[in-house]
């Protein structure tokens, strides 16, 4: 490969990273809009219960620990990829998937419990904004889990190419971004909801 071809490839890679950062910033704007909506509507319970009566904080803390652990092991997968340890990368990514899927199952069970008790999204503006915000995050987690399956398959099939390493790095950024969003949800929705 000539020097000009390497330079063009490096520029293309930088463009892809920039594009992904732009995507993350637009996702920040989306979440900021939904957070603002939630903050405005959180007192509008239509005479029903608020967060203090509905939220089970030990349950939410378990969810939080699962997601933070998934982010930690995702970081270990990226470190293993830099060391070219294929088995370790796949193992850490499978662990990331398990922790992320467990988080999603708990989130869905919280939704099912709330709806079963008559506290669905249609009950009040507060619950509508709660389900929208937390559900949006959950949808991102679900997409991330699908992306993770594809990355594991690609690494198993192709090994460490420039493309698979780049996709793993971008996935890691996405997954850590979802952790930051969850910490904001945990603080603004759950902690402030029970105080």
Image (cartoon, helix red, strand yellow):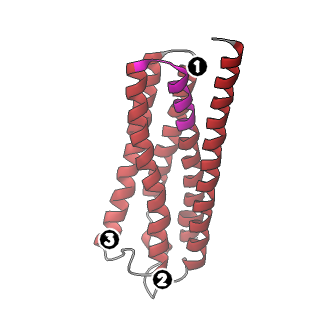
Label 1 residue SS? helix
Q: CA distance from mark 1 to mark 3?
A: 45 Å
Which callout, 3 or 2, points at the residue further toward the start of the chain?
Answer: 2
Mark 1 or mark 3: which comes first in sequence?
A: 1
Q: Nearer the viewer, mark 1 or mark 3?
A: 1
How many C-alpha atoms fall within 10 Å of the one at disc 1: few (<14), some, or many (≥20)?
A: few
In magenta, the rendered stretch is: 158-172
Q: Earlier in the sequence, mark 1 or mark 2?
A: 2
Identify the disc placed on residue 82.
Answer: 1
Within the image, what quadrant is residue 138 found in? Answer: bottom left
Whole-Å distance between the Cαs marked 3 and 2?
15 Å
Residue at image position (53%, 64%) is 190
Residue 111: x percent and y percent? 36, 64
Q: Which label number is shown at residue 45? A: 2
Residue at x 58% of width, y 19% of height: 82
Residue 25: image x %, image y %? 65, 52
Q: Position of residue 78 (x, y in %)?
A: 55, 27
173, above or below 112, in the image: above
Numbered label tally? 3
The quarter of the image holding the C terminus is bottom right
């Amino acid at each position: 490969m000539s020097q000009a071809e390497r330079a063009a490839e490096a520029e293309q890679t930088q463009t892809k990273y920039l594009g992904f950062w732009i995507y993350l910033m637009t996702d920040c704007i989306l979440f900021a809009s939904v957070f603002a909506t939630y903050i405005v509507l959180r007192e509008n319970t239509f005479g029903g219960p608020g967060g203090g009566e509905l939220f089970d904080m030990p349950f939410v803390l378990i969810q939080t620990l699962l997601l933070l652990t998934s982010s930690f092991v995702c970081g270990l997968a990226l470190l293993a990829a830099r060391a070219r340890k294929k088995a370790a990368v796949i193992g850490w990514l499978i662990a990331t998937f398990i922790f992320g899927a467990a988080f999603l199952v708990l989130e869905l069970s919280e939704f099912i419990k709330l709806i079963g008790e008559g506290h669905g999204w249609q009950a009040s503006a507060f619950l509508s904004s709660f389900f929208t915000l937390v559900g949006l995050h959950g949808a991102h987690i679900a997409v991330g889990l699908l992306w993770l399956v594809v990355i594991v398959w690609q690494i198993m099939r192709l090994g460490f190419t420039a493309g698979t390493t780049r996709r793993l790095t971008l996935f890691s950024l996405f997954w850590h971004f979802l952790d930051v969003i969850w910490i904001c949800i945990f603080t603004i929705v759950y902690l402030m909801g029970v105080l």
